[in-house]
Image (tube, rainbow, N blue to C red):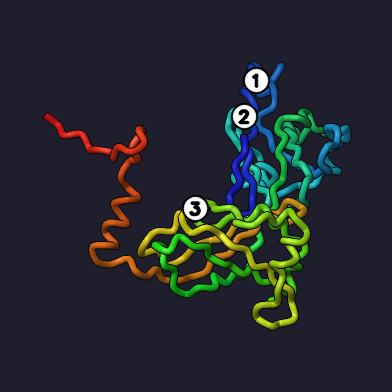
Amino acid sequence: MYEPVGSSLLATASVDPPTMGVYDASGECEGCGPTGYRVLAQLLPSGSAPPTDRAAETWTELPVAGGGAQGISPLGSSVTVEIASCPLGSYVWLATELHFDSGFASSVVSADSTLIECAPPVQEVEINIIPRSINLRSHGVIPVALLGDESLDIMDVDAPTLRLGPGEAAPAHDLTDAWTYNDHLQDVNLDGFMDLIAHFRSPETGIVCGDTEATLTGSLLNGQALAGTDHFRTVACGGRKGVRSFLDRVQPQSLEPGRPAKLEKKE
Ligand SMILES: [Ca+2]
């Protein structure tokens, strides 16, 4: 029903066209239904019951792309509601307010059309992939420093959620253990803000020869996502050994131990 787009959320609400009435000779409409509608949105804390306040005037009008809250949309059409930001854990309720020739209805006619959980935007963080050159043939660990600063208290990071690279490698060490975690804290750039150094097994990161950057993702203890990217270069990738290493990765593994996988020849 919704999809996050950057830091905004989109939702769609629509109203089915009612049976229209009949205009008489004087232009008066007998039994005419509403001619349009607009959508209003309200933010409520997570777990709240549906809004009971059905007075449209008291609802916050969040920006609605396509004119929903700003104008009248024809019945049967869809309206996209764009919420630029909302507090963590809050919900957005959409309400439909019908429009008649004489103006908007005095109250919200539908207050439970769509329920959307708000997701906070991803917090950009600064990371430092410590080896500037990565030798993928070494199959070692890649230490990555997540740098704390004015906007990131490193203690707010949910360290076990950190993942590196397209393979989303998890930390090689058990950062849920308090002693292990403390061993990984260090102010690596001597700026007075504590940093966290996590290690990732290079084969698990999905980093391959020729890659020049990798992204560290994870979340804060409050659930907000974080992400940071750093650059490096891969070494020992050229020559026959490099090609061999590449083929080792792309060839399927044999299902039977001890027997190498073979590519089937087409007849
Ligand atoms: Ca630091």
Position above or below: 33 against 99: above
Mark 2 sits near ligand 1, with its Cβ under 8 Å away: no
In the depicted view, which residue is nearer to us: 215 or 242? 242
* Distance Cα–Cα, label 2 vs label 3: 53 Å
Q: Residue 227 sits in which quadrant?
A: bottom right
Q: Is label 2 or label 3 in front?
A: 3
Question: Residue 212 vs residue 40: left or right?
Answer: left
The residue depicted at 23 percent of the width and 62 percent of the height is 240
The kind of residue tagged 3 is Glu
The kind of residue tagged 2 is Leu
Mark before the other along the chain sequence, 2 or 3: 2
Q: Secondary structure at mark 1?
A: loop
- Please report contact status of discs 2 and 3: CB closer than 8 Å, yes or no: no
* Distance Cα–Cα, label 3 vs label 1: 57 Å
Residue beneath label 1, please?
18
- Considering the image in quadrants, where does the C terminus appear? top left
Residue beneath label 2, please?
75
In this view, the residue farthest toward the right is 53
Is residue 99 among what the camera can see? Answer: no
Residue beneath label 3, please?
204
Q: Position of residue 99 (x, y in %)?
A: 72, 33
Mark before the other along the chain sequence, 2 or 1: 1
* Distance Cα–Cα, label 2 vs label 1: 8 Å
Q: Secondary structure at mark 2?
A: loop
Position above or below: 109 against 252: above
